[in-house]
Amino acid sequence: MTTTTPHPTAPGTPAPTPRAVLAGIPAYVPKPPAPPAEGPAHRLFLNENPYPPLPSVRETIARAAAEAHHYPTIHPERLTHALARRLDVPPAHLVTGPGSVGIYQQIGQAVLEPGDEVVYAWPSFEAYPIVTRMAGAVPVEVPLADGVHDLDAMAAAVGPRTRAVLLCEPNNPTGTAVGAAALERFLDRVPGDVLVVLDEAYFEFYRSPDAPDGVALHHDRPNLVTLRTFSKAYGLAGMRVGYAVAQAPIAEALRKCAVPCGVGRVAEEAALTALEVEAELLERVERVVAERERTRAGLLGLGWEVLPSETNFLWLPAGSDAERVAGEWERRGLLVRAFPGDGLRVTVGSPEANDLLLTAAKETVPPAR
Ligand SMILES: Cc1ncc(COP(=O)(O)O)c(C=O)c1O
């Protein structure tokens, strides 16, 4: 006689459950590919570089693609050493990852315990609440004051349970900056056992003479991690390469938490060539900065409110009109990012895209002040 045991996946049997903290994290649902836009659409919603890779970088990518059947090294060693030379830091102070968002996950794994508090401004980079919650840590969000980090309030928010402070300088999405003097005064107020993550994703676009340099600062500050990326000024967002600079003990902990081979071969080669042709890339950054100032002046002249920016994007505090304006501009092929109820973040595009934006702004009713 045979007995039948219920199949382990039969209805009613318990299913695996993800960690409870994931309930507080927005779900990613794969979307069907978008239909092609009518006419050229300008991607002004992700703070990308408007210029495609230089011919020399494209050649490298094509050459490296022929080797894509080989694994990369566990950590991108050639890139690590090239960055160490470029930044004049020991290789042991460098951490790489698949974009700086990859390094944020390494930070979460290396440093945060459930129940720890993480202090950051809001609105700021959208990864902050995700990394914090993913680790089971508690976000302590400190509102910006007039679009700028309120460093006094942030210092006051640091308490006995604070494990990390995340500081985006200049800030995404507002483009504003606090400057080196205020930043250093803030760093002096943060206890040494609290990690400060200084996100310098837009470092190369920062023109104020008071711009901080987290790499220089890290030499005297064992609790500082500075993040930079090849995605913005170096125009390699699609390749996914970011890096962090910190003193050896923290850098080593972050490297332990890296996804092995997380920076692919093609990405490593592309980043190496980008470093070699940096001068050419920084000329393009100069053009983006000039376009930023031209576009901001144009918008201000049309009566729009636009915060000063040290990045490759502009923040328009459009309040409850943000979605209306984004919708109107989208119909004109200008894809900008609306933060409902708050404002619009518009990447500085090509001169042609920026001209279209100025025309659209002229023909759109500005938000009520
Ligand atoms: C402040 C900030 N940090 C990090 C990133 C992500 O950069 P990456 O492409 O290196 O992951 C962005 C991207 O928009 C950003 O705005």
Image (spheres, rainbow, N blue to C red):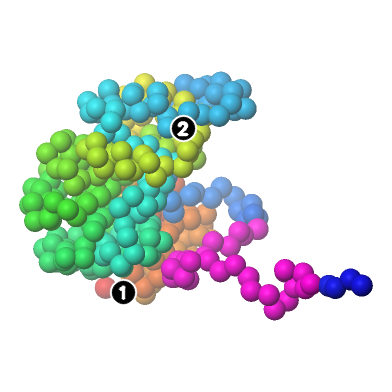
Instruction: Residue 358 in the image: state x and y as whole percent.
Output: 38, 53
Q: In the rendered view of the protein, which quadrant contains the N terminus?
A: bottom right
Nearer the observer, 151 or 279:
151
Q: Residues within 10 Å of mark 2 (few under 14, many from 20)?
A: few
Q: In this view, does 291 lie to the left or right of 144?
A: right
User: Which residues make up the magenta segment?
Assistant: 5-32
Q: Which amino acid does label 1 sit on?
A: Ala
Residue 368 - label: 1
- Disc 2 marks a residue whose amino acid type is Ile
Rendering quarter of residue 359: bottom left
User: What is the x, y in percent for residue 350?
Assistant: 42, 41
Which dot marks residue 74?
2
> Residue drawn 52% across and 54% down?
333
Q: Residue at x 28, y 31 (%)?
A: 92
Looking at the image, residue 309 lies above or below residue 272: below
Give yes or no for residue 275 being in the magenta stretch.
Answer: no
The reply to whether callout 2 and callout 1 are in contact (CB within 8 Å) is: no
Image position of 269 (left or right of 305): right
Give the distance between the C-alpha atoms of the residues marked 2 and 1, in whole angstroms.
53 Å
Q: Is mark 2 on a helix, strand or loop?
A: loop
Q: Which of 325 and 346 is in front in this view?
A: 346
Observer-nearest residue: 237 or 206?
Answer: 237
Q: Is the magenta stretch mostly helix, strand or loop?
A: loop
x, y percent for residue 189:
8, 56
Could you say where residue 328 lies in the image, as x and y percent from the top left? 48, 65
Q: For the residue labelled by badge 1, is the local secondary structure a helix, a strand or a loop? A: loop
Q: Name the outermost residue toward the front.
A: 1
